[in-house]
């Protein structure tokens, strides 16, 4: 046996095996349920997507999020600002800007 099979570890390993067996049984039971009994959470795709046209995905922004954005704009400007549009942008731009900022902060010693 390996060094990990000591008495405290053996009891822990056995407990983990029992938990895995119980979870496997629960998963098997869920997979055997008929498809009609399972709730449908995904909406049907729009007709345009079926044809092959790509439409931008629009995510709704909650009223609470708009209030937070409005408060941030007011704090930044020092007065109440008017929000005309809010849209979600991909994280690629933020990631690129972060990398530029970090790289610009490095001091290169040229001697």
Image (spheres, helix red, strand yellow):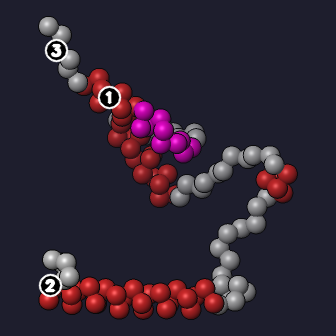
Q: Identify the residue at the far front of this view.
A: 1
**Are circles 1 and 2 on residues that touch, CB within 8 Å?**
no
| Residue pictured at 42% horizontal, 33% vertical | 96
In what element is the residue under mark 3? Answer: loop
Mark linked to residue 6: 2
Mark 1: few, some, or many residues within 10 Å (few <14, many ≥20)?
A: few
Kindly tell me whether residue 40 is visible in this rendering.
yes
Is 100 one of the magenta-colored residues? no
Horizontal side of 53 relative to 81 (left or right) equals: right
Percent x, y for residue 11? 21, 90
* Quadrant occupied by the C terminus: top left
Q: Earlier in the sequence, mark 1 or mark 2?
A: 2
**Are circles 3 and 1 on residues that touch, CB within 8 Å?**
no
Mark 2: few, some, or many residues within 10 Å (few <14, many ≥20)?
A: few
Quote the CA–CA distance across marks 3 and 1. Answer: 18 Å
For the stretch drawn in magenta, the main secondary structure is helix
Q: Which is more toward the observer, 61 or 17?
A: 17
Residue indicated by mark 1: 101
Discs 3/2, front? 2
Quote the CA–CA distance across marks 1 and 2. Answer: 51 Å
| Residue pictured at 43% horizontal, 37% vertical | 94
Q: Quadrant of residue 85?
A: top right
What is the magenta range? 87-96
Q: Earlier in the sequence, mark 3 or mark 1?
A: 1
Percent x, y for residue 10? 21, 87
Query: Is 27 situated above or below 40?
Result: below
Quote the CA–CA distance across marks 3 and 2. Answer: 54 Å
| Residue pictured at 69% horizontal, 46% vertical | 56
Residue indicated by mark 3: 109
């Amino acid at each position: 046996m390996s060094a990990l099979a000591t008495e405290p570890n053996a009891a822990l390993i056995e407990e983990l095996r029992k938990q895995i067996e119980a979870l496997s049984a629960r998963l098997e039971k869920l997979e055997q349920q008929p498809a009609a009994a399972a709730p449908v959470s995904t909406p049907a795709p729009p007709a345009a997507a079926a044809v092959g046209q790509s439409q931008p995905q629009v995510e709704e922004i909650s009223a609470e999020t708009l209030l937070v954005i409005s408060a941030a704009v007011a704090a930044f400007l020092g007065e109440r600002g008017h929000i005309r549009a809010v849209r979600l942008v991909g994280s690629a731009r933020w990631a690129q800007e972060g990398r530029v900022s970090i790289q610009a902060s490095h001091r290169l010693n040229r001697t």
